[in-house]
Amino acid sequence: MRRFRLGLILAGLVLGSIGVTAAQSPGLEVTAPAEGSSIDGTDVEVTFSVTGIAIVASSVPLEQAGQQPEANRPGEGHVHLMLDLGSVVVWNTTDPYTFTNVPPGEHQLMVEIVNNDHSSLNPPVVQQIRFRTSASQVMPNTGESDLDSTP
C-alpha cells in the first residue's frame, strides 16, 4: 500500500511537471532592424513576432505604469518600443511599427513585452538592437534636364 501511494505521488509529480513545461512562456523576436544593420533613410520599420502571449490593448494609462496590477491577466500583454531612450511607444498589435524622421547616426532600439499595467514581465522579455541610419543619397539638381531644353 505504501509503494502504491508513493507511485501515485511520483506519477502526480511527473504529470505536474509535464503540465508546467507544456505552458509556453512569452517569447519575442525582433526581425528588423537587424543587430548591426545600416538603414538608408529616415524611416525605421520595426518588425517582430511574439509567442506564448496574446497582445491586447491596455486600459491603464502609461503614467500609471505598475500601479494597477489587478489589470494584469496571465497570458496577456502588449509591446513597448523605445528608440534612443526616447518616449515609450505603446503598441497593442504585432503589426510593424515605423519610427519616422530618425536622424542619421547610431541608434538603440528596445522592444519589450509587458503586462497590461505596463510593468515588465517576470522575468523581463526584452530585446535591444543597435543599428545605424544614414541620410538618403539624393542627387543634387545640377542644371536643366534634356527633357526641359529646346533645340
Image: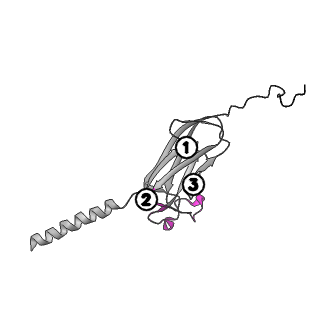
- Callout 1: few (<14), some (14-19), or many (20+) C-alpha neighbours within 10 Å? some
Does dot 2 land on a helix, a strand or a loop?
loop
The image shows residue 15 at horizontal and vertical percentages of: 25, 65
Q: How far across and how far down the image is residue 20, in percent?
A: 32, 62
Magenta span contains residue 148: no
In the image, residue 116 above or below residue 82 = below
Circle 2 Cα neighbour tier, 10 Å, few/some/many (<14 / 14–19 / ≥20): few
Residue 91 seen in render: yes
> What kind of residue is marked 2?
Gly
Q: Which mark is residue 109?
A: 1
Q: Earlier in the sequence, mark 1 or mark 2?
A: 2
Disc 2 designates what residue?
52
In terms of image quadrants, where is residue 2? bottom left
> How many numbered badges does the structure rendering display?
3
Mark 1 secondary-structure assignment:
strand
Residue at x 51% of width, y 67% of height: 71
Distance of mark 3 from mark 2, alpha carbons? 17 Å
Q: Which mark is residue 150?
A: none
| Residue 29 in picture, x, y percent from top left | 47, 48
**For the C terminus, which image quadrant?**
top right
Q: Which residues are magenta?
A: 51-76
Q: CA distance from mark 1 to mark 2?
A: 22 Å
Q: CA distance from mark 3 to mark 1?
A: 17 Å
State which tag comes first along the sequence, 3 or 1: 3
Q: Closer to the camera: disc 1 or disc 2?
A: 2
Q: Amino acid at mark 1?
A: Leu
Which quarter of the rendered picture does the N terminus lie within? Answer: bottom left
From the image, tell me which residue sits under label 3.
95
